[in-house]
Image (cartoon, helix red, strand yellow):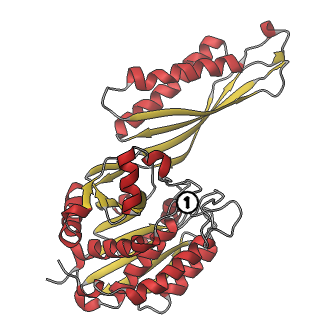
């Protein structure tokens, strides 16, 4: 398949490389993306698009081009609280903040797609919505836009699309039907004991011992309560109690993280956690019921099979079968699916590579991918600008035209 207006992107790429470097140098954390939102609006101001600010630092660009389907494409915009160590000449200028997950690349590629579709309206018909979403990293941004009336403020899409840059070989595209990113839930549990002097343990209900018993028992949820072959992760990331060696504290706090690919498994694990914690508290003689606080909850990203097939066929037709592969699910999490779920529409989400082929293949051959290829969220994460940027723009456009192209 040939898309004429994608054959010569030199002028566009020259400008967008500079924009990408600018965004990378000025990262902003979740819900603080004010300068980023203004920069996106500035890029859109010269185009024939409707621009709205939704959800504080979210930006939506709408291109209306006659009768036809309505397609929504989303890019996330926030950075991470990471100190960059790449040594790039365009490295972050903000202490303690970095685009360590490629969201600056997402913004730039979607802006490129919006510009190309705006200036080539004779090649398609319908409505294209470019949605620039804040605060993906904290699972707050999609909900913030929905809470600010997103569903009522933009045309209802028929399908939603999103992509993510990954530390895989540049020029490759990973797609798959079904779960591609896990649901993620964080949980703070506070268990209550009875404080006492360290020399008088008989006067206490020791929350450290109680919390330790809980940690050990939680390990059986995956090993003994989850059906073999079903994916689940239960991680106790922190256990905090006490302040001094000779004081038995009156409480302990545990921080948990859960990952699942199945809604029922997720619900079963949450129920098992609460059951185990309550039972251990009762066994220890805890004077008070435990407290449970769920936060940073990410929905499952579960690609619609029909949409995924359509997009995969479009990618294969345009880029060639050697560029497109079936990805395995990642255990990372996203909040993108909240948006199509709110509209009750299908969606698909794919991955684009960002590592020079020779570097990636050498690491594969040596079995050192995990050691030699910095992953997302690493202070060394640095996508190859070329041709990642060009490929990312093309994937956005090809995916959109799978629905919008004129016959």
Name which residue lies at 48% across and 37% down.
Answer: 258
Horizontally, residue 48 falls left or right of residue 207, namely: left
The quarter of the picture where residue 401 lies is bottom left
Name the quadrant of the N terminus: bottom left
Residue 120 image position (x, y, % from top left): 30, 90
Q: Position of 117 compared to 131: left or right?
A: left
Please state which of residues 52 and 311 is positioned toward the viewer in this rendering: 311
| Residue 337 showing in the rendered view | no
Q: Quadrant of residue 72?
A: bottom left
Give the tally of numbered discs. Answer: 1
Q: Is residue 70 above or below residue 288?
A: below
Using a 10 Å C-alpha cutoff, classify the residue at mark 1 as few (fewer than 14 neighbours), some (14 to 19) or many (20 or more).
Answer: many
Specify the quadrant that holds the C terminus: bottom left
Residue 12 visible at all? yes
Viewer-nearest residue: 361 or 5: 361
Residue in the image at 26% along x and 82% along y: 126
Report x, y in % for residue 353.
38, 62
Tell me if residue 337 comes above or below residue 218 in the rendering. below
Residue 203, located in which quarter of the rendered image? Answer: top right
213 in relation to 255, above or below = above
Residue 299 place in picture, x, y as percent? 43, 49
Q: Classify residue 280 as left or right of residue 2.
A: right
In the image, is residue 102 above or below residue 176?
below
* Residue furthest to the left: 407
Residue plotted at (40% across, 34% down): 232
- Residue that label 1 marks: 100
**Residue toward you, 38 or 384:** 384
**Residue depicted at 48% across the width and 86% down the height:** 15
**Residue furthest to the top:** 202
Q: Which secondary structure lies at badge 1?
A: loop
* 58 and 279: which is toward the camera: 58
Measuring from the top left, give residue 68's x and y in whole percent: 23, 81
């Amino acid at each position: 398949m040939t898309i004429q207006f994608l054959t010569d992107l030199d002028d566009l790429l020259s400008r967008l490389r500079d924009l990408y470097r600018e965004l990378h140098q000025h990262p902003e954390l979740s819900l603080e993306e004010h300068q980023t939102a203004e920069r996106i609006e500035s890029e859109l101001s010269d185009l024939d698009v409707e621009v709205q600010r939704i959800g504080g630092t979210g930006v939506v660009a709408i291109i209306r081009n006659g009768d036809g389907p309505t397609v929504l494409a989303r890019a996330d915009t926030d950075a991470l609280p990471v100190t960059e160590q790449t040594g790039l000449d365009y490295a972050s200028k903000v202490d303690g903040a970095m685009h360590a997950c490629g969201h600056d690349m997402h913004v730039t590629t979607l802006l490129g797609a919006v510009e190309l579709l705006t200036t080539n309206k004779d090649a398609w018909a319908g409505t294209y919505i470019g949605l620039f979403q804040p605060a993906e990293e904290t699972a707050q941004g999609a909900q913030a836009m929905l809470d600010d009336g997103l569903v009522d403020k933009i045309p209802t899409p028929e399908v939603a699309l999103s992509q993510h840059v990954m530390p895989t070989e540049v020029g490759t595209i990973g797609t798959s039907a079904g779960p591609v990113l896990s649901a993620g839930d964080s949980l703070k549990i506070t268990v209550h004991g009875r404080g006492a002097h360290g020399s008088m343990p008989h006067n206490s209900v020791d929350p450290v011992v109680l919390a330790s018993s809980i940690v050990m028992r939680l390990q059986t949820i995956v090993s003994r309560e989850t059906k073999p072959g079903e994916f689940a992760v239960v991680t106790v990331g922190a256990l905090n109690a006490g302040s001094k060696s000779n004081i038995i504290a009156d409480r302990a706090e545990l921080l948990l993280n859960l990952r699942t690919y199945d809604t029922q498994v997720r619900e079963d694990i949450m129920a098992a956690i609460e059951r185990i914690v309550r039972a251990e508290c009762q066994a220890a003689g805890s004077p008070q019921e435990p407290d449970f606080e769920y936060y940073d909850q990410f929905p499952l990203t579960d690609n619609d099979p029909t949409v995924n097939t359509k997009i995969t066929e479009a990618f294969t037709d345009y880029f060639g079968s050697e560029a497109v592969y079936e990805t395995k699910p990642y255990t990372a999490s996203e909040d993108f699916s909240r948006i199509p779920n709110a509209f009750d529409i299908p969606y698909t989400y794919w991955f684009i590579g960002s590592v020079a082929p020779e570097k990636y293949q050498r690491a594969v051959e040596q079995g050192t991918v995990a050691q030699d290829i910095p992953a997302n969220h690493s202070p060394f994460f640095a996508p190859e600008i070329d041709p990642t940027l060009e490929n990312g723009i093309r994937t956005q456009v090809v995916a959109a035209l799978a629905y919008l192209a004129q016959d």
